Amino acid sequence: MLTLVLMVVLFALVFEYINGFHDTANSIATVVATKVLSPIQAIALAASMNLVGALAGTAVAKTIASGLIDAQVVEVTSQVLICALSGGIVWNLITWYFGLPSSSSHALIGGLCGAALGASNTNWGSIIWSQSADPWWKGAGLLWKVVIPMFSSPLMGFAMGFLMMGLLFAIIAGMARSGGLLAKYARPRWVNGFFGKAQIVSAGYMGFAHGLNDAQKTMGIIALALVSAQAVGTLDNLPVWLDFLHPSQSALENGDIDTWIKFTCAIVMAAGTAAGGWRIIKTLGHKMVKLHPIHGFAAEASAASVITAASTLGIPVSTTHNISAAIMGVGTAKRLNAIRWSVVERMIWAWILTIPAAGGIAYLLIELLRVLGWA
């Protein structure tokens, strides 16, 4: 049983590493595409801000650990978690290979739901669909924590990107018309220089928001596995060098995430970005729309604001969806035909298919383990 728990931790870290291919790459795509930072500089910024964000809260981790699967209907065993993570990993690798910025968040959620359905013999009650609350935004379950944000957060990212870009255009146009000293600062050289510096701040903000939301998802899986293992006595009599696996008293009582889990997930995510993120960066930063520093600043600031707000509410939104939608909004404000809509269409299909595809893979893996007598 201890081996299975360690396998869950390993699979979770593999998922986090691959998450770096997708979502951390998304968070730095614009700052690399605008040539404000080199890929190495952007990765270093993202990694450091991921870590700060990962240490800044636990609301999303708590949602993943306890807000989607009904433990009274299906036992969340190590096998279930391994299949859930494997479903997300396989789908992430498929979309990464084709350079599609799909959502690692939704891949993980789809994997969890598919594995729970498989383990419960397709009992749909194993998934917490909806739990209303007062106020309404504190509602739990797949509807409130996943489905509604899946549509609303990209719309907000698009709208904020469009409005921010429109506001910046209006300010610069007003400066140009005013004449004198202000007109000098409305020239492209000055605008690019100013927003080149500002984009370093917005890229750091984006990295923070990504760590605050995405890094917590894998943290939630690891915490769930360790707390479950502690409850059934799997972690009793561990050798000294594995003592760190014991959840702290605070983790057991309050659902807090132990610090070693936070640091490990943030570091592994950064390593994944360094290894394979360029495919996604090219799709977002080069293929979809041509970006300048002012566009990158508007997109990053808009997307990061939406993600940070969702993280505060414990909502596991997609970094991919939000930065993609914000870039679309910024590009549309520039001009409607600035967006390469054929690329957008491919991305949207990847968004739609992610939860059912990852869920289907996880479900089939559970069935395979059952046939082999391992589940």
Image (cartoon, rainbow, N blue to C red):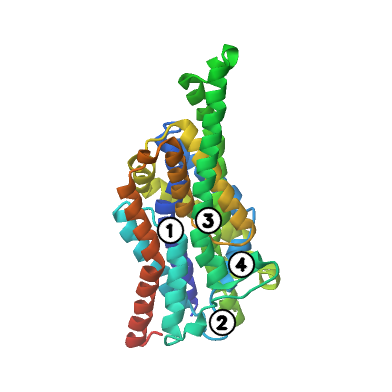
- Say whether disc 1 or disc 3 marks the residue closer to the N-terminus: 1
Foreground: 257 or 159? 159
The answer to which quarter of the image holds residue 174 is top right
Q: In the rendered structure, which amino acid carries the disc numbered 2? A: Ala
Closer to us: mark 2 or mark 3? 3
- Say whether disc 2 or disc 4 marks the residue closer to the N-terminus: 4
Q: Secondary structure at mark 3?
A: helix
Left or right placement of residue 110 versus residue 262 in this view: left
Q: Identify residue for label 4.
A: 62
Mark-to-mark CA distance, 4 and 3: 20 Å
Q: Is residue 318 visible?
A: yes
- Say whether disc 2 or disc 3 marks the residue closer to the N-terminus: 2
- Say whether disc 2 or disc 1 marks the residue closer to the N-terminus: 2
Mark-to-mark CA distance, 4 and 1: 19 Å
Image position, residue 306 (x, y; %) = 57, 51
Mark-to-mark CA distance, 2 and 1: 25 Å
Mark-to-mark CA distance, 2 and 4: 14 Å
Q: Identify residue for label 2.
A: 71
